[in-house]
Amino acid sequence: MVESKHISSNFDEDLSDLNNEVARLGALAEGQLGQVISIVQSGDIAELDQLIKRDYELDEIEISLNEKALTMIALRAPLAEDLRHIIVALKVATSLERIGDYAKNIAKRVKLIDEIDVLTDVARVLDMMGRMVQDMIKTVLDAYMERNVGAAMEVWERDIEVDELHTTIFQDVLTRMESKHISVTTGSHLLFIAKNLERIGDYSTGLAEQVYFLVNGEMISDERPKLDTAT
């Protein structure tokens, strides 16, 4: 009995460490996204190179987290609910690393826009969309740490709001390209920026589904609300 408690205590400590790594990875991914959103809004591209270079930090945390999780599985041989905690942590970490990649890709696109002043024309909606997905990330990470299914499901249901803003930007940029108010090159970069933000929204709702699975032991059966568009 003493040994059983000892093993359980060790697992709880390892799981706490694992979740702390998830929280650190999440804070960095959210921070990267927030910084690039501010740059899109201000048009000040001076910090873009440093932001792009910092992407390796997310990769290193994810690698460390994966190694810790695999060690836990090998040493503790967790079953049922305990194993679910580890699997979800791994999936959350992968999603957060991808969110960081999208933030880096947005930064690279901003660097390539020659007509940097044009950002002020569409920056308001891009900023709105960016801050929306940033808030979704923060909310769903808090939900993960607190095992709060209700908060996670609120994020899950907001996916359609992100889709609506993406459609608005998509149509606006196409109109500007057709009227030659912006070049095809600049318009293409703006479309990719908006698409990257939309994908971050998708990852956020995916994280919400993982919180649901973590708490309930089954995946949510409803289909994620999506706006039916060709974008």
Image: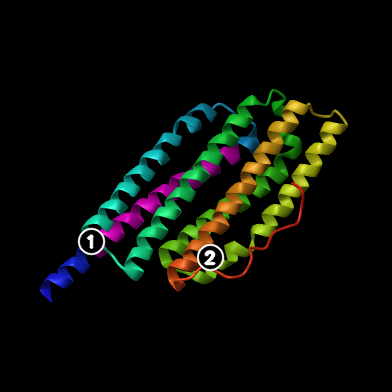
**Which is nearer the N-term, disc 2 or disc 1?**
1
> Of residues 95 and 138, which is closer to you in this image?
95
Give coordinates of residue 176: x percent, y percent. Answer: 83, 34
Give coordinates of residue 29: x percent, y percent. Answer: 48, 45
Give coordinates of residue 209: x percent, y percent. Answer: 53, 63
**Residues in magenta, as a range:** 11-38
Q: Please tell me the numbered disc located at residue 178.
A: none
Q: Amino acid at mark 1?
A: Arg
Residue 4 horizontal side relative to residue 148, left or right: left
Identity of the residue drawn at 60% across and 53% down: 202
Distance from Cα at disc 2 to Cα at disc 1: 29 Å
Judge whether residue 130 can be spotted in this image.
Answer: no
Q: Please tell me the numbered disc located at residue 152.
A: 2
Q: In the current view of this chain or complex, which residue is farthest to the right? A: 179
Identity of the residue drawn at 13% across and 76% down: 1
> Of residues 108 and 73, which is closer to you in this image?
73
Magenta stretch: includes residue 102? no
Badge 1 marks a residue whose secondary structure is helix
**Is 219 placed above or below 36 here?**
below
Residue ID for mark 1: 76
Tell me the mark number nearer the camera, choosing from 2 and 1. Answer: 1
Q: Amino acid at mark 2?
A: Ala
